[in-house]
Amino acid sequence: MSEADLAQDYQEFFQENVSSIAAYHYSKRGFRPFQELHFKDSGMETRELGLSRIRITPIITGTWQAGKSMWVGVEDAETIQAIRAAFDAGITTVDTAEVYGQGHSERIVAEALGDVRQQAVYLTKVFANHLKYEQVIEACDRSLKNLQTNYIDLYQIHWASGAFGSEIVPIAETMRALTDLKQQGKIRAIGVSNFSRVQLEEAAQHGRIDSLQPAYSLFWRSVEKDAVPYCIANQISILAYSPLAQGLLTGKFSADHQFDPADNRAKNKLFQGENFVRAQEALAKLRPIADRYETSLANLSLAWLIAQPQTQAITGVRHAEQSIANATAADVKLSPEDLAEISAIGQIVTDPLDDNPVMWNW
């Protein structure tokens, strides 16, 4: 039995709310009994990741900020506390990537969750410049080292080859590497990020894809017209990043707010010109609905998103308070009528947008 198989067994026990078991620990000498492990009953529902048997939470901790690159004012100690607070609040799934600070984000995740690794679900990604066979293998080994783990639950292609001027690599070659890693037990499932439906269909010809990670929120919904129907038909989980439109859906940004030029949000299309004006109009219409549910605009938006078919929300955090607040979004259950009304309000922002799926003017 591989470490990944053992983790699956742990998760199944966890789902049955077992508070403690006599567990076995994998070592080079085989399996040996060790101390009783205590499993935290988070109280948060979990869902299957694609067809993988891996259980993930509907709210997922995102760690782009943890890498610090393209962000300002991020402190490691606060990030570690935020990731751990999310876990303690029931968000046991965490998403990272090798490119976030060149491995720094992965190392921060390991520092935050290393002692509860068996209860956590790690998602990470290989970048577009590492998609040749040997590059994928080497990148995975680096991520395993950064994360201080023997397996990665979900390993994703971050961007398709050719993105950001990277070399074009046949998807068959990349998928062969990922499939080999899966067979070796180094990864448990394969996913893609920022893929169009056409790219997703092509990748799926070479192996099972269990997830798609697109930019997706109430204010950014191009994926609904492209890949979502395919994902639903093929039981591919949707892991939405920027589910709060990089904070816009919190309602905390005034019309005169200016981002530091080093902050990637300075190039977010939704914070610019008429898009931002329309967003403020939509937020004004959403506030009475949030008040009716006695929740925040942020949690209303997250609740709407995770109510969409097969959709989970990856929420970035800087502070523990944000993590705790994000976790409560899973408790907001919207009526069908309110889901439809919220969706229509979001179209105030989305209908005038073009079909470009990239949210930034990079």
Image (tube, rainbow, N blue to C red):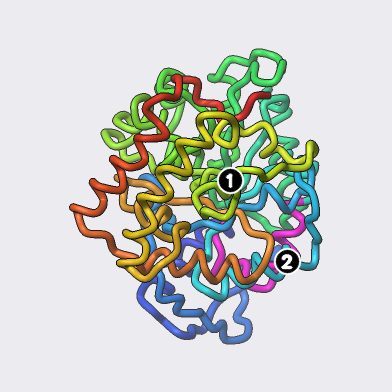
Circle 1 is placed at which residue position?
246
Question: Pointer 2: residues within 10 angstroms few (<14), some, or many (20+)?
Answer: many
Question: Pointer 1: residues within 10 angstroms few (<14), some, or many (20+)?
Answer: some
Residue in view at x 34 percent, y 33 percent: 228
In reply to whether residue 151 is colored magenta, the answer given is no
Q: Is residue 36 above or below residue 327?
A: below
Q: CA distance from mark 2 to mark 1?
A: 20 Å
Q: Is residue 177 above or below residue 28?
A: above
Residue in view at x 54 percent, y 78 percent: 23
Residue 31 placement (x, y as % from top left): 60, 70
The stretch of residues the image draws in magenta is 105-122
Assess whether mark 1 and mark 2 are in contact (beta carbons under 8 angstroms). Answer: no
Q: Is residue 24 above or below residue 54?
A: below
The three-letter amino acid code for the residue at tag 1 is Gln
**Image check: 72 left or right of 331?**
right
Q: Foreground mark, 2 or 1?
A: 1
Residue 281 placement (x, y as % from top left): 42, 42
Q: Quadrant of residue 37?
A: bottom right
Circle 2 is placed at which residue position?
80
In reply to whether residue 107 is colored magenta, the answer given is yes
**Image check: 129 left or right of 207?**
right
